[in-house]
Image: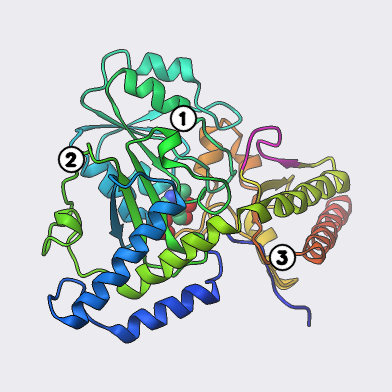
Amino acid sequence: MNQTVYMDHNATSPTRPEAVEAAARAMQVGGNPSSVHGQGRKARRIVEEAREQVRRAVNAPASAQIVFTSCGTEANSLALRGSGRPNVMVGATEHASVLRAADAIERIPVDVNGLIDPFQFDEMLAGGGDDKVISVMLANNETGVLQQVEGIARIAHRYHALVHTDAVQALGKIDVDFAALGVDLMSLSAHKIGGPQGAGALIATKDVKLTAVNPGGGQENGVRGGTENLSGIAGFGVAAELAKAELPDMARIKALRDRLEAGVLELSNEANVIALLTDRLPNTSFITMSGVDAETQVMAFDLDGLCVSAGSACGSGKTKSSGVLGAMGIPTEVAKTAVRVSLGHATTDDDIERFLSAWAALYQRKSRARSAA
Ligand code: PLP
């Protein structure tokens, strides 16, 4: 039996051994970071060290607020509900945790490549931005498309709007530079970079007046109540440091991803790569196979020992046609055949060959069935 090939890093990237060790050490400390005694102070030091590791990983200034949360979803919710701006405007291809963070949300349309048109965005702000928080993701979780967040922030700031970016998928795959992007708020999640599940962070400039969504006992500077997830945070800090250090390996991963895409496109002219010619994450491909539902493909790949996914992982484990592709104007019949392949540091040349032969076998089976019908 062949070993499993894991190509679903955008769902969760397997936990790094160093993050597991850091989490285990923190668990053994066991104190509450808010306690004043020695054990509590040990726990506090772990939290503060991780805060510095996360800060350095995204080049946030020393003055920035870094609020640990339970996940990227909570960081997004805190950004959009706790920023003090009543009106929320978000990109049409944002993650569900942004699209569903507030009751009334205005969507910024994207083009067929998933990109926001800066002129259209500028026009949408013509009424003023003082009451608005804008959320535009750095990298899309399904297509990998990179938005021009720096330019979006410049436009939004002309209208005095606050700008949030969901950098959950970008961290560890491209250089994420909070200061250079010029945003006011940024969300991160540990499990996308080989940290533990259940830890995230919201970063904000010192000028953003954050209000807690869950005030609880006033932890995290009164912005996020609840005892900190000590082991998760410790693992997050280590993972953030390693993810930044290992960024140069993304060039190798991109070469593998490009080979995979070229291989699929050579195998069939009925295959397409979404946003092929657009700037994308180096590890991500969203590939359609005409006439075969994504769910069927994912099951077939799984039988061949390959873990891929049909768009974003959702809580129910069910798959439905991608809202991201819908927002890009891609017809449902095409969208429902799209499978996301997301590579990681462990991906090898052999893995790409395994994927291509599984893809070819599935495509041939489908073609035979079609000619028999
Ligand atoms: N934002 C993006 C772009 C994501 O891909 C995800 C997870 O898939 C999230 C936010 C949510 O992160 P978490 O799973 O930590 O809640």
At label 3, the amino acid type is Phe
In this rendering, is residue 338 above or below 301? Answer: above
The residue wearing badge 1 is 150
Label 2 sits on residue:
209
For label 3, the residue is 301
Residue 189 horizontal side relative to residue 11, left or right? left
For the stretch drawn in magenta, the main secondary structure is loop
Q: Is residue 131 above or below residue 240?
A: above
Residue 266 horizontal side relative to residue 243, left or right: right
Q: Are marks 2 and 3 in contact (CB under 8 Å)?
A: no
Q: Please, what secondary structure does the residue beneath circle 2 have?
A: loop
Q: Identify the amino acid type marked 2.
A: Lys
**Secondary structure beneath label 1:** helix
Kindly report the distance in space between the C-alpha atoms of the residues bearing marks 1 and 3.
38 Å
Q: Residue at x 52, y 43 (%)?
A: 140
Picture colour scheme: rainbow
> In the rendered image, which quarter is residue 274 located in?
top right
Residue 278: image x %, image y %?
A: 65, 33
Question: At label 1, which amino acid type do we have?
Answer: Glu
Residue 257's x, y, as percent?
Answer: 73, 51
* Residue at position x 43%, y 53% in the image: 56
Q: Can you tell which of label 1 and label 3 is closer to the viewer?
A: 1
**Region in magenta:** 272-280
> Real-space Cα distance between discs 2 and 3?
47 Å
- Residue 305 in view in this figure: yes
Q: Residues within 10 Å of mark 3 (few under 14, many from 20)?
A: many
Taking the image as shown, residue 82 lies to the left or right of residue 117, namely left
Question: Which of marks 3 and 2 precedes in the sequence?
Answer: 2
Q: Quadrant of ligand 1?
A: bottom left
Whole-Å distance between the Cαs marked 2 and 1? 22 Å
- x then y, percent, for residue 175: 54, 45
Residue at x 66% of width, y 58% of height = 343
